[in-house]
Image (spheres, coloured by chain):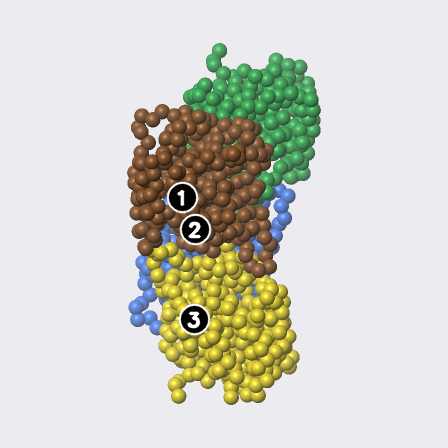
Chain colours: A brown, B yellow, C blue, D green
Amino acid sequence: MAIAKKILFFGDPGIDDSLALMYSLIDPTFEIVGVVTSYGNVTKDQATANAAYLLQLAGKTNVPVIPGAAQPVQQDEVMFYPEIHGEGIGPIRPPTNMQYQIYPFDTIRLIIEQYGNELIIVDTGRSTTLATAFILYPDHMRMVNAYYIMGGAFFFPGNVTALAEANFFGDPTSSNFILKYAHNLTITPLNVTQYAILTPDLVDAISHNKKNIYAFMLTPVFEYYYEFYKEQYPGIPGAPIHDLLTVMLIKTPDIVDYIYYDAKVIEDVEAKGMSYIDIRPTSQTGKTKIAIHLHYDKFIEEFSKVMLPE
Amino acid sequence: MAIAKKILFFGDPGIDDSLALMYSLIDPTFEIVGVVTSYGNVTKDQATANAAYLLQLAGKTNVPVIPGAAQPVQQDEVMFYPEIHGEGIGPIRPPTNMQYQIYPFDTIRLIIEQYGNELIIVDTGRSTTLATAFILYPDHMRMVNAYYIMGGAFFFPGNVTALAEANFFGDPTSSNFILKYAHNLTITPLNVTQYAILTPDLVDAISHNKKNIYAFMLTPVFEYYYEFYKEQYPGIPGAPIHDLLTVMLIKTPDIVDYIYYDAKVIEDVEAKGMSYIDIRPTSQTGKTKIAIHLHYDKFIEEFSKVMLPE
Amino acid sequence: MAIAKKILFFGDPGIDDSLALMYSLIDPTFEIVGVVTSYGNVTKDQATANAAYLLQLAGKTNVPVIPGAAQPVQQDEVMFYPEIHGEGIGPIRPPTNMQYQIYPFDTIRLIIEQYGNELIIVDTGRSTTLATAFILYPDHMRMVNAYYIMGGAFFFPGNVTALAEANFFGDPTSSNFILKYAHNLTITPLNVTQYAILTPDLVDAISHNKKNIYAFMLTPVFEYYYEFYKEQYPGIPGAPIHDLLTVMLIKTPDIVDYIYYDAKVIEDVEAKGMSYIDIRPTSQTGKTKIAIHLHYDKFIEEFSKVMLPE
Amino acid sequence: MAIAKKILFFGDPGIDDSLALMYSLIDPTFEIVGVVTSYGNVTKDQATANAAYLLQLAGKTNVPVIPGAAQPVQQDEVMFYPEIHGEGIGPIRPPTNMQYQIYPFDTIRLIIEQYGNELIIVDTGRSTTLATAFILYPDHMRMVNAYYIMGGAFFFPGNVTALAEANFFGDPTSSNFILKYAHNLTITPLNVTQYAILTPDLVDAISHNKKNIYAFMLTPVFEYYYEFYKEQYPGIPGAPIHDLLTVMLIKTPDIVDYIYYDAKVIEDVEAKGMSYIDIRPTSQTGKTKIAIHLHYDKFIEEFSKVMLPE
């Protein structure tokens, strides 16, 4: 059997981050070697507890949980989204007496020293914490094998403003920093993740699967999240699990089609957080692999394979 | 026969503006009652001479030519585009000894007083001059029947930057002003005008038409413009005549499909000139009629009917 | 006797503009050849009525009153200041049945053609209207002899924000345009005008002067304005008559000391309207004559000479 | 004898930072408990070596040196100033074979845990690293006793631009963050530090003092720095040692006079890095203690007392 891919997971779980984490923890082709938590969908403290809880359910209490940023440096007020992500993982709250250890920020550096070029960094949250790692440990970050980031919307409506996707809106300065400095970078913008829809039927099937350690919580977590999407996108047949798709591409890159451009994020007030590329016919292509079209059948097939173990 | 529609034409001819003017001057259902000229595709002086020349060829020397703005108020350097529009009308220069009268800016006010609610204002150029008319004569501008503006690109690549269309990029502050204050406003963004393509075959046919007063100049003017597009959009089967489509909608509105939103233009540095609307599923619709899809066959049919008189 | 200086006066009277106008109309060394009125301290309509009223009191109904801009092109909400300037000239309202003629905007062009290099333009209001004249008549504006502008505050607290003076704050884009394009330009920032203080004693003296045609209104107008300043600048011994100083420099330039720099105005949100120059020891001097220090005795002496005719 | 004040020193030495460090290391009323180094006057690596060298000369190799940020998150190009600060400490380079240990970033957290409310944080460099500490350890930063920051220029010319002082210009977003979140904060802007001038005579006296461990390097270091100031401020009688004054205020606060306001830094392009307060007569005072006037005699007296030990 092939060696599992080592993943250092940055995120702000949050429901779709949690589904991405569950999928990664169940799939034996992945090995999560650390989870770095931040403000974003929820507060840093809640994201940290949620991550610790998912690790405990998977029996992986040895995986370090590393708290990162509690807010961006910019002084715009930080917005959290309890109406989408709840105050636990949706309606599911980690046990109040749960014990877990947190690790100092320098653990990121030690993990990179340990795994070096085998390590893949995934970021499904706001960009602040990952950018901070770049600012403090630039030489180490260059040793990492690859980066996978959920973020952006290219010539595509945003989800927090008319123009901006939530991750890149939360700290566009940090997002721009990562888009510039992260090598071997793949991003999954709303252009694909908006269509990575999980339907109630599939969730129901998973929730009845005896071997899936998260089966018991999947229906309430999904329903909470789907409620929001039904209001915002009337008629939508399920809920887009943005962060999940991002992780899946590490293993099954052909779920989507890609284009290669140098992406940027607007930092100015009015279009804050809008990502863009220059796709005029004679413009230059660039370094970043941008997922641009989703093959839905492949997405469902891969997800089912992992989440419906036989 | 129906009364001709009274048009006060603002523009910066420029090749596509010139084709729009030719079409309007030939079609008996239009009556051009004034041409207001500005900096833009070309300098104000050249735009003025070009407009006067087209009027003279049509025998309409009684139509006032009114010079407007020579530059925007913003101090970004003004860019002209001789590589697209030439230093005359493409390669065709008005006779050097051409005599023509120019009218003071207040003529706009007098024209509105004369025609009132019968008057339609078309603007195919940068927004500075039209905004100046609003600033000086706000009460008069409210008397006008309708406004038709070429400008913008909504979730669509720009033509002067990755994000911005040339008219709204030239003076985004003035464009925003018009988008806010002009009532009964229809805009034709690149989303439709980029597909309003004139092919060499049709141009050739027109250039052999004996009754078309502009037949003699059409081939060289078109070829000059098409050269640019062949370079910028390799494989394009002809050249998009943006401003022409804008005028045609006055007469034949069903050439395109529309959506109704409140459009805005970004004034900040990086996304300068980008237009946008909020099209998220639960967002509000708005007051401006935005052409969003072109029916190409109808476009060609209407254009041919006017430009190939029998 | 020397030929009177021809003044084309742009302003938004407003109390201090009105005092500047009164002074200019009384002093035989000035000849006001036109008054262009705009939004600013008060609405355009009120400014126009106020100007017409002051001209009528002076028996100069032949001087054209030319309405300019009713608002800037930028879409920030326009603020008026009735608490400072009242809804007439302070508490004095022009007669409701007052008849007066207004002239079209092109009159500016005709006035310049008539007086050419003899003409001095003064602008005591927001910069929109003067910039519009530059945009429409650039060649004419180059024929004018000199420009005098009230505006700015250099390393000095603002009066509408912590950093910005009201005239340059109202339309910083237009102010920048004028600072760049107006030749032979003198500006009077708050650095001097804040100290050009008229005291109750002097006002009282003028109000008892039999030969001053405005004597009857001076006390109520001044008191209205002084009330505001007493609240905002506790302990201030009188009220600064900003616009008056600007006009006085035409005749008696040595009331102030000057420095020469290229001044700019910030257009961005946070420091909007702040003017600045580079005064670091090795920086370049520039083209604009900036009044930087007021000789108060000379100011009072000159003002008294005109306003207390014997 | 009183207990020495515990200082965690953030800086980018740099000549004036080095003089501040020397002064702090010599004065027995201070105990430096850590030095956090960053990009700024010089690169992070050079700043780190310089700090380690000064500690070694003082025999304090047990004081942790903690490298911080190598650049800000914003993507403006980072500027270093070798023409002012040299490529060592001015012309003095740490020995090439110098051995020293560096400590991980989390050491900041541990130092705060050890000293708590006894700890004073001084920042004489760009604000990136200190803001990063706030982002990662917000609860710890609230335990610190006080903050002293060199930065800003209030209604006073800048030193890197016409309006901006170098520290706040380098990362205005982080500076704003600190100005908002740091409690018990004193800042020393150019308004005072520009006058904290060290003269050649005094430097000469120190360089002949047998008991000052840095005596051997003081003349060349000072001369290097003074050369720059002589060019930029012709006639200046010595060189302003900005960062030194900042540290001195901890011990002898009455060297300067203070005002209390909430200070902000402009982040927008044109006035980037400019700091300001609202000092209009009726504005609110605020939380930050801003040094606004220097008593030069006291400054020289205090500096001489420490640097000329008997």
Amino acid type indicated by mark 1: Ser
Residue A223 figure quarter: top left
Q: Read off the chain for label 1.
A: A
Q: Read off the chain for label 2.
A: A
* Tag 1 and tag 2 share a subunit: yes
Q: Which residue is mark 3?
A: B256
Q: Position of residue B93 (x, y in %)?
A: 63, 77
Q: What is the number of the mark on residue D204?
A: none
Q: Which residue is mark 2?
A: A297
Q: Is residue A104 above or below residue A260?
A: above
Q: Position of residue D128 (x, y in %)?
A: 52, 35
Q: Read off the chain for label 3.
A: B
> Label 1: how many residues lie within 10 Å, few (<14), some (14-19) or many (20+)?
some
Residue B210 figure quarter: bottom right
The span from disc 1 to disc 3 (Cα, nearest Å) is 44 Å
Q: Which residue is mark 1?
A: A304
Q: Residue at x 63, y 22 (%)?
A: D53
Q: Residue at x 32, y 47 (%)?
A: A200
Residues A104 and A259: in front is A259
Q: Position of residue A256 (x, y in %)?
A: 49, 50
